[in-house]
Image (cartoon, rainbow, N blue to C red):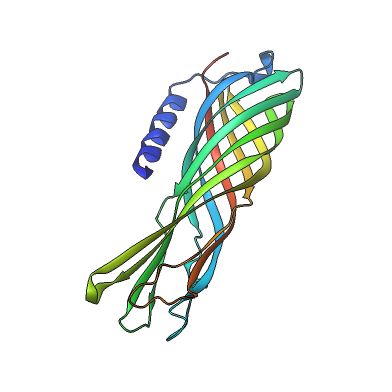
Amino acid sequence: MRQIYLAAASLAAAAVASMTPAQAQQVTNPWNGFYVGVNGGYAWQDTGGTFDNLQTNTSLNGLDLNGAVVGGQIGYNWQSAQLLLGVEFDAMTLAGGGEGINAPSTPAAALDADMNYLASVRARLGWAINNWLLFGSVGWGFSEFEFNQNIPSTNFSTKTRLDDSGLAYGGGVEWMMAYGVSLRAEYLRYDIGASSPLPVAPVADPGDRIAFDNVDVARAALNIKLSH
């Protein structure tokens, strides 16, 4: 999936380079229509929990899923004078994978966590000023997180997947640098968290659990209009 996002980004950049700049403010309702784009930025998410709590207690707080994210979006805008209403679907994943730690259990265990995807469907409300757009958005977010236990000395491994959904909201600013091509900066908050007991394994005990907290994302996006 990450390779697909990078390929999409390359195609979008090539499309922008081939376009002739135009003054967007000279076109009536320039934000109207369908658009598609790519995005990239940084995400913050805390984790928590305990592993092997009956022997050598290992805190899972060190598995925070902070890192670069890449993704894409597709949406539709309806503009009337300066007022804009829209809807957008977006999806992201961690560009460099998750985090890992080693638990000093007996036998030793390697633990790692990852965010498989983070997505949302949101409504947008904006105010257009020439070729600039100020907007806020709110909708529903979806995610899947993953926690893996690996014990190299016994070739044992187990995987725990957690799915959750919750409110997603944020806002930002968008600049139409050429007709049909825009750059965006935005912040999004995903009120998504998931917690689960860990399956009892050779060094996992009853009471062990993993928890993923809410996600904050700051990102930039490149959009290209598909209709006029």
Q: Residue at 66% of width from left, 27% of height from top?
A: 86
Q: Residue 18's image quarter?
A: top left
Q: Quadrant of the C terminus?
A: top right
Residue 3, x across and y down, in percent? 34, 42
State left or right for residue 208 relative to residue 141.
left
Q: Residue at 57% of width from left, 40% of height from top?
A: 120
State left or right for residue 76 relative to residue 52.
right
Image height check: is 149 above or below 140? below
Image height check: is 55 above or below 134? below
- Viewer-proximal residue among 51 and 21: 51
Q: Residue at 68% of width from left, 32% of height from top?
A: 124
Q: Residue 136's image quarter?
A: top right
Residue 82, x across and y down, in percent? 76, 22
State left or right for residue 136 relative to residue 200.
right
Q: Residue 149's image quarter?
A: bottom left
Residue 173, x across and y down, in percent? 67, 37
Q: Quadrant of the N terminus?
A: top left
Q: How many dots with numbers?
A: 0
- Viewer-proximal residue among 185 and 169: 169
Residue 175, x across and y down, in percent? 63, 31
Q: Residue at 63% of width from left, 35% of height from top?
A: 122
- Viewer-proximal residue among 223 and 115: 115
